[in-house]
Image (cartoon, rainbow, N blue to C red):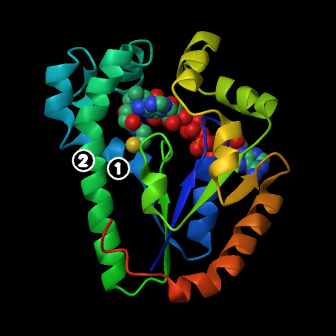
Amino acid sequence: MFVLGLTGSIGMGKSTTAAMFRAEGIKVHDADAVVHSLYRGAAAPAIEAAFPGAMRDGAVDRSRLGACVFDDPSALRRLEAIIHPMVAASRDVFLAEATKSGERLVVLDVPLLFETGIDRMVDAVVLVSAPETVQKERASARPGMTPQRLAAILAKQIPDAEKRARAHFIIDTSSGFAAAERQVRGILRALAGAADKAKSRSEI
Ligand SMILES: CC(C)(COP(=O)(O)OP(=O)(O)OC[C@H]1O[C@@H](n2cnc3c(N)ncnc32)[C@H](O)[C@@H]1O)[C@@H](O)C(=O)NCCC(=O)NCCS
Ligand SMILES: Nc1ncnc2c1ncn2[C@@H]1O[C@H](COP(=O)(O)OP(=O)(O)OP(=O)(O)O)[C@@H](O)[C@H]1O
C-alpha cells in the first residue's frame, strides 16, 4: 500500500484538497477531524484537567483552547503531549484497516506532517501551497483570527519555502478549484504504478 502524506500551512487549502482526494475514491485519514472528535469524547477529561476553562457544555471549546495555547509555547507543548499520541493511535488503526481491505493508496492528511516527523514515515509528500498574500488573506478570514494570532501560528510552523523544498508534489491552490482537482488527478496518475509496487507499511 502506498502512503501519501498531505500537508500545508494555515489557509493553504489542505482540507479542500483532501476532499478532492476523497472524491477520487481515496481513503483519507484526517488528523484534524480525529482531534475534533477526541475533544468531544476521549480527550475531554485530560484537557479539562490540564486547561481549566477550555471546556463548554462537556466538550472542548477549540477557540477557548486555542486562546490558551497559541500564545503560550509551553501550554501548546502540554496539549501536543496529550493529543499527538492519540492521533498516532488512530492513524495506526486506519493504516491497519486499509492494508487489510486491500487499498492500493491512502492519504494521511496531517497539518504538522513535517513538524512532527511523519514525512519520514510516508512514501511521498504532497504539499498544498499558495502565495503568501493568498494564504494571509484566507487565514485572516477565519473566525477569531487576528494578525497577532496568525503571526504566532505561522511562527510555530516550518516556513512554506522549506516545505516546498522537501515535498515530492506541490499543489498550488491559487488558480482555483478546477486547477487543483487536475493536479490531484495528475498525482494519482503519476503514482498509480508506484502504488502497485509499494512496500508493506506495517512499520508505520
Ligand atoms: C489549539 C486548537 C484547539 C485550535 O483549534 P482551531 O479549530 O481553532 O484551529 P485549527 O486546529 O484549525 O488550527 C489553526 C491553525 O493552527 C495550526 N496548528 C494547530 N495546532 C498546531 C500546533 N500544535 N503547532 C503549530 N500549528 C498548529 C493548524 O495547522 C492550523 O493551520 C487546535 O489547533 C489543536 O487542538 N491543536 C493541537 C493539536 C494539534 O497539534 N493539531 C494538529 C494536527 S495533529
Ligand atoms: N483550489 C482552490 N481554489 C480556490 N480557493 C481555494 C482552493 N482551495 C482552498 N480554497 C479556499 O481557501 C480557503 C482555505 O481552505 P481550507 O479550509 O481547505 O484550508 P486549510 O489549509 O485546511 O486551512 P486551515 O489550516 O486554516 O484549517 C477556503 O476559503 C477555500 O475555499
Measured from the top left, where is residue 183 in percent x and y?
76, 65
Disc 2 residue type? Met
Q: Nearer the viewer, mark 1 or mark 2?
A: 2
Q: Tags 1 and 2 in contact by the CB under 8 Å rule?
A: yes
Instruction: Estimate the x, y position of residue 168 in percent, counting from the top left.
Output: 66, 60
Residue 83, visible in the rendered structure = yes
Q: Say if residue 145 shows up in the picture.
A: no
What percent of the width, then of the height, locates residue 86? 24, 47
| N-terminal label among 1 and 2 | 1
Q: Where is residue 138 drawn, in percent x and y?
A: 71, 32
Residue nearer the viewer, 103 or 156: 156
**Whether residue 34 is situated above or below residue 201 in the rendered picture:** above
Q: Nearer the viewer, residue 164 or 185?
A: 164
Local packing at callout 1 (Cα closer than 10 Å; few below 14, some 14-19, many 20+) is some
Q: Residue extending furthest right?
A: 175
- Helix, strand or loop at label 2? It is helix
Q: Nearer the viewer, residue 162 or 21?
A: 162
Most foreground residue, 170 or 44: 170
Q: Quadrant of residue 39?
A: top left
Residue sitting at 76 percent across and 49 percent down?
173
- Quarter of the figure with residue 80: top left
Taking the image as shown, residue 84 lies to the left or right of residue 191, namely: left
- The residue drawn where x is 25% and y is 45% is 85
* Residue beneath disc 1: 34
The amino acid type, in three-letter code, at marker 1 is Val
Residue placed under numbered mark 2 in the picture: 86
Please give the name of the residue rendered at 35% of the width and 50% of the height, measured from the top-left corner: 34
Q: Which element is circle 1 on? A: helix
Q: CA distance from mark 1 to mark 2?
A: 9 Å
